[in-house]
Image: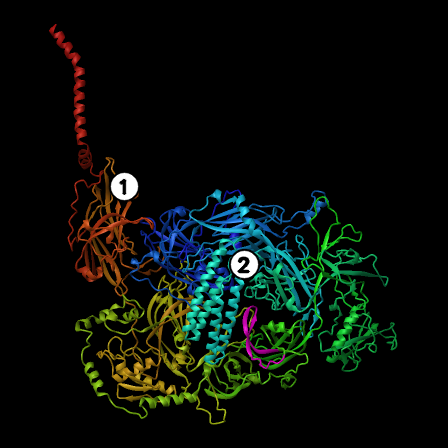
């Protein structure tokens, strides 16, 4: 993910530990065998292109399984980057079948595309949005891009809840994802088979089989950081010190660290004002394992109180390098450190945001060191951290544990600068700085000073183009001491593997060169065996043992990983050495070895920073180069040294830049090229080793400058802006007396003047001839004449100069002519130019009366005398050393040697040599601060310790370093011979589409260029450039071991400026004397902006020219040297035959049509021109179709020059503009040997016995064939014949040929042969039908920077071909011509039949993500649009249509098949198109006009459909191939093309089908198929859109027949799609049992109100039974009928549904679904939603067999049962009627078992439309209630709805359950009433009774 997006889109957990709202976790899985954080990628993402391109991501959502929940409406949302799309909603299922393709378009680089995240979400559309997520799966596109063909095919992804990771899996979704880039081919994923229901989902998951996601914690311990750069300006700090608000200096940075991984970010606390922060914090990031994130980001930040926080630098830990997922070993989790990581970014001096600020974000290569941090990473599996555990402090034990890892050792870095060349003009002296980390940075103030920079030197012109640094015999050196961790054991192991890789690559390159040069097989095999022998020796060397202490866990794991991998490669290499039989296969295997070794040749814990070389101009950093420290590290073990350590090598500096910056132009100019010697190692190893190979003496000098100023024409030291004695910048006062030798050093002499020799070079430096000039000036008084005696002389700037008579010829030069007046300017006849005042200027060539000044220029040419060159150099050094003064106008401007009038200041350099008594002593001068002479003005090459608050004053201890040189006595002289023979495939830089190339060869301090060749992209210079007196210092043997490189730059010559075409690098062969081996021409790759830009054929020899006799100079051609005969290729006379057929598709040129073109063929300097075409619109073919020419070409194909094709247009007035060109790089494809071909055919005919034509019939075989022809075939019966028309048609053949075993079963059973279904265009399988003629695209115009030559930019095509063969060297008769039997190239009228079968994966054009495609065809002016028959809302439509078009070849040779998207209101959109060249198919001997079937039928559904019989085709083929006609022996044998074909070899069964034709025709057909003619086929063509021509827009399956109208045209084939049948499904639901009781009545009883719902999936027209109320035992009785009419396609076993997507849709779109009957049991509720109880899904084509009894029903009866028990399956369409019991179940989710929730008894019946009408039946129990008659269900009396039957409720609910309670209550009430009555009446009765008695 881009760092900017990461910052903007994701939250950061604060230091307090209280996290903000977190984003969802990126749950990622992958295929590897252990719980590994990131898989090892097959593609190195760092090497991916950063160029913006068009990409298309296609996500095919197939289906879902085991989604959590029941009766859900799932929809799948897909998010790719910032784009989102979704599928349709599937209703009432947890096994949705989507089968939809979603498209996402991107315009970005491949590197950025890999970081785009992908999220697959499944939601339940029935719920509200906040609670609708079922599960999600996340990963990045890099995982897909790194897969084979950049795609996933039929992968299951595991869904989880990102908010609750402990809840487990939520379901599975099957997806296919493909990434299409420019040039990628679209591959359609195969359709899922019908048995996918039985496939274990987890066997194809993007993670280990059966392993669940595990919570894990990534623990990153951030201990401390060092050398953090200053990020704030010191303006406010200075104000605080002035105002006494602050004492002392403060570090101007407030650092903190951000750690980001898997979408989560944590940050440390902020430490203020410190360059060395110690955070000591532990950051814990929780993730789910396995995770697909491949990098962990560490970002160093600076807290800003007023603006946005600044990014200091970014480092990415690549987890693929910190872990292992090797299936052959156990692997290990990511681990790192404790170790330092180094941060790189923009230059440390960059404080404010600038254009290089993206480097700090990790975009591009950092050009400067920006700090380092001590980091440790561990991964713990088991649980994720809580919020309080995400951030915590490191305890003391961890601090003590990491202390040993911080032990430092002293390292020494030595760099010798031997040459500085190829420098472009600069405005200030140039110096170079070496730094490693912060050591050596001249602007840094926190490290001790060191001699890390070279002396500022003025570049000198080399006489041709570039500038160089005149270091001469004193080469600047730098020696840098630094302290780093002891990681030598890591570097040595890394270098050991790198050495093995380098040797292996070098040997493999030699083998590939021999294969390319067509060397003898024995030589190539011997080289390959030698390669393997050395590889085995290298792999047998054991790895270095790890030390006992201070090693990390990653060290141990990497050691084991490397050891195991090298042993495996060793075993494979030994096996390859013993069993290799094919060199090409062996090369492929060795390439895999290199890749595997490169995977282990990484060392993520190398804490030593890279060595950085900076080029400084003034105080500006101009260019840099980074060298990995391990490459220059020394080791006592030779094989463990870095490959650059102790060697001289070339370094190309580059300017700091951000990749793909939109407003930045590509810089082809190299800032500089350096020849350096680098050595780095431990200080213990440095004694006498680091510079010993240089064969020079190290000299150390103290340095100071004496300064003076000119006042009143006198030089003085008064009133100067800088001290009298100072450093070179004038900011530090350095009198001689202030220098005291450091400890361990002593003086070796007195102070002496040592001037800068670069100032002694004049303007003529580097030139072989020079023109001196001087101006003669005259002045006059107004009104007077020009005086002749008062003359004065000046230079061009007006400075006073010597007269021409006083100017002497410099030493080493000699005059070539006399002084003459320069008249080649704007002057009058005498050479004068006039002006009013000379100081003002404004000279004009016409004299006026007011002109007071005139001048004229005198010139004189001189040339250099080589004999006096040494003398001139000596005089120059003497002149420079006389006084040593350098002059300038100001101290801040550029100095020069000669004093000028305007010069106001001067200086000279003083040196004093030092020698070391102690080799380990540091050469650092400490200037005494108490000296009166000392004054610090600033800091330059001087550093001061940090001041405290008690010494806040200017006087301070200042340390400076001396100057170091590597001195030589005398140089060695060499001669370079550059043999520049030719180049090919150069960049077109002119509007004509060509270039005017020349080559500039740069070697050392010299450069020369070749002659200019006009209008060619394949120049042949055949020129030798001789570089005389090339001087190199040092031992010649060392130079031979590490030769200096030769740079060849190619340019296009223009009148104003030159366009850069590319650059090639070559290494010369060094010959010190006695070598006799001649150099060989080699092809050197030319690059331009990092991209290939052609090849250069050349060789280079470097001779030591010190008295030894050199080879003779090469022969001359005019004024240039040719390539000598021993090096130039061996030539032979070769004949090139050219088939000039015609031109095609010519576009307008210069606003006019190309009507009269002609062709020029050029090769080897010979040009062949054709006759012009009279009118290309009427006939674009040439009248003469065959031509030839003879030319001398190299014998070796490697050196063969390209063949150039140019097309000219003949226009009025003799104008012939160049329209277009084409270049054929290699002629190998067209080479033939006609003599050998004729002899071979004759020999084979004699051997086979067909020398004489003979026609005899094999009677025995013929009789049996005739007899069998009249008998019925043994494989068929009369009953089968009756089924023929019903079961077999063209689509049966199509399905069988496409590999659909189920749909093509009947066809195969009948014994028919399949046709060929090509997965790509037909042309790809038959060489584009170019056996007769090829189409060569012609290009015109200047090629732009990022433009590729693709055929869409062609201005036209040349159709033709070539035959190349050698002619006899003895002058005998040439062989017969190859291109003599070519067909007539006149116009031909044809009938074209285009059969279009179907299309796949079309690009959607409508907002709903679909399209309404229809077909359109175009052939010339003939157009067909089938707009009324568009297919609504379909991306994979089946067309099944045939179109007939009339055309004339070649006028109408291009057939376009287009697919448009139908739109009602707006214009139709073009989805894509494909183009077919009909002419190539018509002319090809492969006969692409009509495919040949595998059998010859004369009757039946597959009878012969060609216009010609097989025997006629065979005879015509022999004629076109210049072969003898076929020779027949009877009707059962034929001899063709050196081969005898027998009929019995093809018809081995001996049975002849009654529809087969005659035997000779059948044999001819078999012979044609053996000869490779086009078989009966369907081709799959890719569709492209002109708006995005590089991205496929889908595929289409078609086949094309072409018949000339002069022939008998056969009838067409019927490929109309099959019409679906009208069927009716009748389902009778009888009973249910054991249904779960989900309700509880108020009486406490478990019960359910059961009803059954059913529908066909896809129709979604649901029907349901009545309700069986109050089921108390889980039983339900219904006797209810469902009736579902549907349309069925038997051949595909799918149901066809046509319906509108929504109410406002205009058309019904067609969908195909498996015929799946869904049955669900529900519990009816009145006031709340009904409760779902269980379901059953039956695929009627593949359904489980029913049980007869309910008690035997279980979940094991389902095909996907958990036990994996096989289940007998049946097809309802075969049995027509099925009755029985099936289980009902409820899904429990992926981690929960199913639950049996009931059993249902049903009867399912399939009826045709006619049967349904004959046997009518109503739904439910409606009339007609017949077939069969359904009686009302016999339900118990307790089944009723309580509130509709109150009396039944009283009887069956209340009375049955509470009758005894009721009776007891009544009795109790009666008793109570009686007691009450007694109590009430007893007193009255007693009183009455008592009264009565009384």
Q: Residue furthest bottom?
A: 1372
Q: Overall secondary structure of the magenta stretch?
A: strand
Q: Position of residue 1718 (x, y in %)?
A: 27, 53
Q: Position of residue 1774 (x, y in %)?
A: 21, 62
Q: Where 94 falls versus 637 (above or below)?
A: above
Snapshot quadrant of residue 1249: bottom left
Task: Please rate how many residues cluster around mark 1, counting C-alpha atoms within 10 Å: few if below 14, some from 14 to 19, many from 20.
Answer: few
Cβ atoms at labels 1 and 2 below 8 Å apart: no
For numbered disc 2, what is the local secondary structure?
A: helix
Q: Position of residue 1281 (x, y in %)?
A: 19, 73
- Judging depth in this view, the residue of 254 and 1628 nearest the camera is 254
Q: How many marks?
A: 2
Tag 2 residue = 489
Q: Where 1849 falls versus 1433 (above or below)?
A: above
Question: What residue sits 68% from the left and 70% below the top?
Answer: 467
Task: Please rate how many residues cluster around mark 2, counting C-alpha atoms within 10 Å: few if below 14, some from 14 to 19, many from 20.
Answer: some
Specify the segment rendered in magenta: 1073-1101
Tag 1 residue = 1726
Dot 1 or dot 2, earlier in sequence: 2
Mark 1 or 2, closer to the camera: 2
Q: Position of residue 1525 (x, y in %)?
A: 34, 89
Q: Where 1559 falls versus 909 (above or below)?
A: below
- Report if residue 1301 lies within the magenta region: no
C-alpha span from label 1 to label 2: 80 Å
């Amino acid at each position: 993910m881009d760092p900017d997006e990461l910052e903007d889109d994701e939250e950061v957990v604060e230091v307090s530990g209280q996290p903000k709202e977190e984003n969802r976790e990126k749950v990622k899985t992958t295929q590897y065998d252990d719980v590994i954080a990131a898989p090892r990628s097959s593609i190195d993402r760092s090497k991916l292109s950063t160029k913006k391109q068009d990409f298309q991501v296609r996500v095919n959502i197939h289906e879902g399984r085991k989604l959590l929940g029941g009766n859900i409406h799932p929809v799948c949302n897909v998010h790719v980057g910032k784009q989102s799309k979704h599928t349709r909603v599937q209703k009432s299922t947890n096994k949705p079948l989507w089968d939809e393709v979603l498209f996402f378009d991107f315009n970005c680089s491949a590197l950025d595309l890999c970081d785009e995240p992908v999220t697959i979400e499944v939601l339940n559309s029935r719920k509200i949005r906040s609670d609708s997520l079922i599960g999600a799966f996340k990963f990045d596109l890099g995982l897909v891009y790194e897969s084979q063909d950049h795609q996933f095919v039929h992968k299951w992804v595991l869904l989880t809840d990102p908010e609750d990771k402990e809840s487990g899996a939520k379901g599975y979704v099957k997806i296919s994802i493909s990434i299409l880039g420019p040039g990628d081919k679209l591959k359609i994923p195969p359709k899922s088979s019908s048995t996918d229901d039985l496939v274990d989902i987890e066997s194809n998951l993007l993670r280990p089989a059966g392993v669940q996601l595990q919570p894990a914690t990534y623990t990153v311990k951030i201990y401390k950081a060092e050398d953090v750069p200053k990020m704030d300006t010191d303006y406010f700090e200075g104000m605080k010190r002035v105002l006494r608000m602050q004492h002392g200096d403060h570090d101007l940075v407030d650092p903190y660290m951000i750690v980001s991984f898997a979408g989560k970010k944590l940050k440390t606390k902020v430490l203020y004002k410190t360059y060395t922060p110690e955070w000591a914090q532990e950051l814990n990031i929780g993730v789910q394992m396995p995770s697909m994130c491949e990098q962990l980001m560490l970002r160093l930040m600076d807290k800003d109180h007023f603006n946005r926080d600044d990014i200091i630098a970014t480092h990415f830990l690549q987890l693929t390098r910190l872990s292992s997922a090797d299936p052959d070993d156990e692997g290990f989790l990511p681990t790192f450190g404790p170790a330092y990581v180094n941060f790189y970014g923009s230059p440390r001096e960059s404080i404010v945001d600038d254009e290089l600020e993206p480097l700090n974000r990790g975009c591009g290569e950092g050009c400067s060191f920006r700090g380092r941090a001590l980091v440790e990473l561990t991964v713990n599996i088991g649980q994720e951290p809580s919020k309080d555990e995400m951030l915590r402090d490191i305890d003391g034990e961890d601090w003590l544990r990491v202390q040993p890892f911080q032990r430092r050792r002293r390292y020494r870095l030595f760099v010798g600068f031997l040459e500085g060349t190829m420098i472009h003009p600069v405005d200030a002296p140039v110096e170079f700085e070496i730094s490693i980390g912060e050591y050596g940075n001249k602007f840094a103030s926190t490290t001790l000073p060191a001699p890390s920079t070279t002396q500022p030197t003025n570049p000198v012109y080399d006489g041709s183009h570039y500038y160089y640094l005149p270091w001469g015999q004193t080469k600047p050196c730098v020696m840098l001491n630094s302290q780093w961790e002891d990681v030598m054991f890591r570097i040595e192991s890394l270098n050991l593997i790198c050495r093995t890789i380098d040797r292996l690559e070098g040997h493999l390159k030699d083998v590939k060169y021999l294969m390319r040069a067509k060397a003898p097989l024995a030589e190539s095999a011997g080289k390959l065996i030698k390669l393997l022998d050395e590889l085995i020796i290298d792999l047998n060397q054991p790895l270095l043992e790890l030390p006992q202490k201070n090693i990390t866990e990653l060290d141990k794991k990497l050691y084991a990983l490397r050891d195991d991998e090298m042993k495996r490669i060793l075993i494979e290499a030994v096996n390859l050495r013993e069993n290799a039989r094919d060199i090409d296969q062996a090369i492929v295997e060795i390439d895999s070895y290199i890749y595997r070794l490169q995977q282990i040749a990484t060392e993520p814990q190398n804490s030593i920073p890279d060595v950085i070389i900076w080029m400084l101009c003034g105080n500006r950093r101009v260019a840099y180069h980074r060298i990995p420290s391990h490459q220059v590290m020394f080791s006592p073990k030779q094989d463990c040294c870095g490959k650059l350590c102790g060697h001289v090598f070339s370094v190309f500096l580059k300017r700091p830049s951000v990749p793909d910056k939109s407003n930045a132009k590509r810089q082809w100019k190299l800032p500089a090229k350096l020849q350096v010697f680098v050595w780095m190692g431990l200080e213990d190893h440095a004694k006498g080793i680091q510079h010993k190979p240089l064969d020079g003496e190290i000299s150390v000098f103290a340095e100071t400058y004496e300064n003076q100023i000119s006042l009143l024409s006198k030089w003085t030291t008064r009133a100067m802006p800088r001290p009298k004695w100072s450093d070179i910048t004038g900011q530090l006062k350095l009198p001689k007396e202030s220098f005291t030798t450091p400890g361990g050093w002593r003086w070796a002499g007195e102070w002496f003047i040592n001037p800068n020799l670069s100032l002694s070079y004049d303007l003529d430096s580097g030139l072989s001839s020079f023109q001196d000039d001087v101006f003669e000036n005259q002045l006059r008084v107004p009104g007077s004449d020009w005086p002749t005696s008062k003359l004065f002389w000046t230079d061009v700037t007006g400075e006073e100069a010597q007269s021409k008579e006083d100017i002497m010829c410099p030493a080493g030069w000699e005059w070539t002519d006399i002084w003459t007046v320069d008249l080649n300017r704007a002057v009058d006849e005498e050479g004068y130019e006039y002006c009013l005042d000379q100081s003002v200027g404004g000279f004009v060539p016409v004299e006026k009366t007011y002109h007071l000044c005139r001048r004229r220029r005198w010139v004189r040419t001189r040339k250099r005398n080589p004999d006096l060159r040494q003398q001139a150099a000596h005089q120059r050094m003497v002149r420079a050393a006389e006084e040593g003064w350098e002059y300038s106008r100001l101290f801040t401007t550029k100095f020069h040697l000669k004093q000028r009038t305007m010069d106001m200041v001067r200086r000279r350099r003083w040196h004093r040599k030092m020698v070391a008594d102690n080799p380990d002593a540091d050469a650092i001068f400490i200037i005494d601060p108490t000296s009166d002479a000392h004054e610090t003005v600033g800091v330059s090459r001087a550093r001061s310790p940090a001041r405290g608050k008690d010494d806040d004053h200017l006087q301070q201890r200042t340390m400076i370093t001396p100057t170091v040189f590597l001195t030589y006595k005398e140089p060695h002289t060499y001669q370079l011979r550059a043999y520049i023979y030719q180049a090919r495939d150069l960049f077109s830089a002119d509007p004509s589409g060509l270039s005017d190339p020349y080559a500039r060869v740069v070697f050392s301090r010299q450069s020369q260029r070749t002659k200019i060749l006009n209008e060619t992209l394949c120049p042949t210079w055949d020129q030798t450039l001789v570089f005389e007196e090339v001087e190199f210092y040092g031992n010649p043997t060392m130079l031979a071991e590490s030769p200096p490189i030769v740079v060849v730059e190619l340019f296009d010559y223009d009148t104003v400026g030159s366009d850069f075409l590319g650059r090639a690098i070559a290494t010369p062969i060094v010959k010190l004397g006695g070598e006799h081996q001649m150099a060989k021409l080699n092809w050197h790759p030319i690059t331009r902006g990092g991209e290939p830009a052609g090849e250069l054929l050349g060789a280079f020899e470097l001779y030591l020219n010190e008295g030894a006799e050199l080879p003779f100079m090469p022969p001359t051609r005019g004024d240039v040297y040719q390539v000598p005969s021993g090096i130039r290729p061996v030539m032979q006379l070769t004949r090139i035959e050219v088939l000039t057929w015609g031109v095609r598709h010519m576009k307008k040129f210069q606003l006019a049509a190309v009507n009269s073109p002609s062709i020029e063929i050029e090769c080897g300097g010979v040009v062949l021109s054709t006759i012009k075409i009279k009118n290309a619109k009427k006939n674009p073919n040439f009248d003469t179709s065959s031509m030839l020419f003879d030319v001398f070409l190299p014998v070796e194909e490697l050196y063969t020059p390209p063949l150039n094709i140019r097309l000219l247009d003949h226009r009025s007035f003799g104008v012939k503009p160049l329209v277009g060109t084409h270049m054929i790089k290699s002629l190998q494809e067209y080479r033939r040997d006609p003599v050998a071909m004729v002899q071979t055919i004759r020999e084979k005919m004699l051997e086979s016995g067909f020398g004489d034509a003979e026609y005899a019939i094999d009677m025995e075989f013929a009789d049996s064939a005739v007899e069998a022809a009249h008998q019925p075939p043994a494989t068929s019966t009369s009953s089968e014949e009756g089924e023929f028309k019903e079961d077999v048609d063209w689509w049966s053949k199509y399905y069988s040929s496409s590999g659909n075993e189920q749909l093509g079963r009947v066809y195969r059973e009948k014994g028919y042969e399949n046709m060929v279904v090509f997965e790509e265009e037909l042309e790809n399988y038959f060489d584009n039908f170019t056996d007769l003629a090829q189409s060569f695209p012609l290009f015109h115009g200047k090629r732009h920077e990022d433009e590729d030559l693709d055929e869409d930019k062609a201005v036209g095509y040349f159709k033709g071909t070539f035959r190349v063969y050698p002619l006899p060297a003895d002058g005998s008769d040439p062989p017969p011509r190859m291109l003599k039997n070519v067909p007539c190239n006149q116009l031909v009228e044809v009938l074209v039949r285009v059969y279009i079968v179907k299309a796949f994966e079309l690009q959607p054009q409508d907002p709903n993500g679909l399209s309404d495609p229809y077909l359109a065809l175009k052939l010339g002016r003939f157009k067909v649009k089938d707009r009324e028959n568009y297919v609504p809302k379909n991306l994979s439509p089946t067309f099944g249509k045939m179109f007939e078009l009339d055309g004339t070849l070649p006028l109408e040779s291009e057939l376009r098949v287009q697919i448009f998207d139908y739109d009602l209101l707006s214009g139709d959109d073009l989805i894509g198109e494909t183009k077919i060249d009909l002419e190539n198919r018509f002319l090809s001997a492969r006969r692409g006009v009509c495919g040949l079937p595998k059998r010859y039928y004369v009757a039946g559904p597959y009878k012969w459909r060609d216009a010609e019989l097989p025997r006629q085709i065979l005879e015509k083929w022999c004629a076109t191939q210049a072969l003898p006609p076929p020779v027949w022996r009877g009707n059962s044998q034929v001899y063709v093309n050196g081969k005898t074909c027998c009929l019995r070899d093809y018809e081995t069964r001996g049975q002849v089908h009654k529809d087969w034709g005659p035997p000779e025709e059948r044999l001819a057909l078999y012979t044609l198929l053996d000869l490779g003619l086009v078989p009966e086929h369907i081709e799959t063509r890719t569709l492209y859109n002109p708006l995005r021509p590089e991205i496929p827009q889908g595929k289409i399956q078609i086949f094309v027949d072409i018949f000339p109208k002069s022939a008998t045209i056969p009838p067409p084939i019927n490929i109309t799609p099959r019409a679906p049948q009208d069927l009716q499904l009748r389902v009778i639901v009888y009973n249910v049992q054991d249904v779960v009781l989900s309700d509880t009545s108020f009486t406490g009883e478990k019960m359910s109100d059961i009803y059954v719902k059913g529908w066909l999936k896809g129709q979604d027209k649901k029907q349901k039974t009545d309700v069986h109320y109050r089921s108390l035992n889980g039983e339900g009785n219904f006797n209810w009928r469902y009736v579902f009419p549907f349309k069925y396609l038997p051949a595909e076993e799918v149901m066809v549904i046509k319906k509108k997507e929504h109410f406002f849709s205009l058309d019904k779109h067609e969908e195909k679904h498996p015929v799946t009957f869904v049955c669900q049991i529900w519990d009816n509720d009145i006031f709340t939603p009904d409760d779902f109880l269980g379901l059953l899904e039956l695929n009627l084509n593949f359904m489980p067999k029913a049980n007869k009894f309910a008690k035997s029903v279980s979940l094991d009866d389902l095909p996907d049962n958990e036990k994996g028990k096989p289940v007998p399956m049946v097809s309802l369409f075969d049995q027509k009627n099925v009755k029985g019991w099936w289980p009902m179940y409820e899904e429990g989710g992926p981690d929960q078992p199913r639950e049996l929730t009931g059993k249902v008894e049903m009867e399912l019946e399939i009826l045709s439309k006619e049967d349904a009408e004959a046997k009518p039946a109503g739904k439910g129990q409606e009339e007609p209630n017949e077939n069969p008659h359904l009686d009302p269900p016999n339900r118990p009396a307790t089944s009723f709805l309580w509130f509709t039957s109150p009396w039944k409720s009283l009887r069956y609910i209340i009375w049955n359950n509470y009758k005894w309670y009721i009776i007891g209550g009544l009795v109790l009430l009666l008793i109570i009433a009686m007691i009450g009555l007694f109590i009430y009446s007893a007193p009255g009765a007693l009183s009455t009774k008592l009264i009565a008695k009384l």
